[in-house]
Amino acid sequence: MRNLNDVLAESETTQTELASQVSKSDQHEFEGLSLGGVDVAYCNEMAHACAVIFDIPTQSIVRREKVIVDCEFPYVPGHFYLREAPVILRLLDRFEKTMFLIDGNGVLHPRRMGLASYIGVKLDVPTIGIAKSLLHGKLSKREGNRAFITDNGETIGSAVWLPGKKKPIFVSIGHRVSLDTAIRVAKMSSVHGYPEPLRQAHLCANEMARVGSQ
DNA sequence: GCGACAG
DNA sequence: ATCTTGTCGC
């Protein structure tokens, strides 16, 4: 497996196999589950990742972890995990009893195995995918502030219009969570028209990349 | 063959 | 994502 095409072909097989391991229902094992967000920013070939834990009651960041690693793998639609999973797995390994919002899709994916589901299955932790544009599937009729996204008659996610925003975010199950809960968490953690854990992780990662480039 | 295509 | 100025909208 040397060239990119071979790697992608094998990746598709891996994704299909892992997809069967995704749990699409809410878990009940954890008591006080924390909520976190992860994002990655790039400066040339360096991936700067940041994960934050956001406390909804006090609307504050209670923890922030960072890591920088070399990343040579290119972004290929449908295989985003090959580029970002390595650095994210290293970062989330430091946390316990935490549900993570991840910048990308979960089962809203051609093979039902986007980055969020990959991270969830690999670490066996609850994850939710949040994307800013639609990768796959079709929007059904909008009902209130949401519209389900389907593919082959299967609901794989939902477009969600947050207060004050013209464009929706695309929410999907990552792992160990139901779509209803995923949508609820995305809404209740939003502050500036976007899930705050992700917005904060994004700001932090960008700052890391900016400073790192100087 | 032509377009679509998370970040 | 990243490269970059002005500009549209609330």
Image (tube, coloured by chain):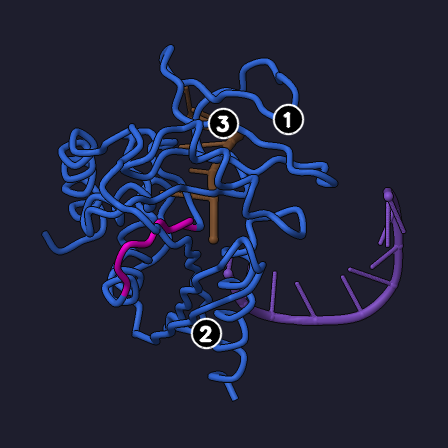
Chain colours: A blue, B brown, C purple
The residue where tag 2 is placed is A43
Q: Is residue A20 magenta?
A: no
Q: Is disc 1 surrounded by few (<14), some (14 to 19) or many (20+) residues within 10 Å?
A: few
For residue A158, the mark is 3
Image height check: is A75 above or below A140? below
Where are the magenta residues, as a range? A95-102
Q: Amino acid at mark 1?
A: Asn
For the residues tagged 3 and 1, is the chain the same?
A: yes
Residue A98 covered by magenta stretch: yes
Q: Which comes sooner in the sequence, label 2 or label 1?
A: 2
Instruction: Say which amino acid is labelled 2.
Output: Cys
The residue nearer to you, when weighing A214 against A163, is: A163
Q: Quadrant of residue A24?
A: top left
Chain of the residue under label 2: A
* Snapshot quadrant of residue A135: top left
Q: Residues within 10 Å of mark 2 (few under 14, many from 20)?
A: some
Q: Magenta part mainly helix, strand or loop?
A: strand
**In this view of the protein, which residue sits in the foreground, A45 or A185?**
A185
A129 is higher (above) or lower (below) than A90: above
Q: Picture coordinates of residue A210 (x, y %)? A: 54, 79
Subunit under mark 3? A
Q: Give SS at disc 1.
A: loop
- Which residue in the protein does label 1 denote? A145
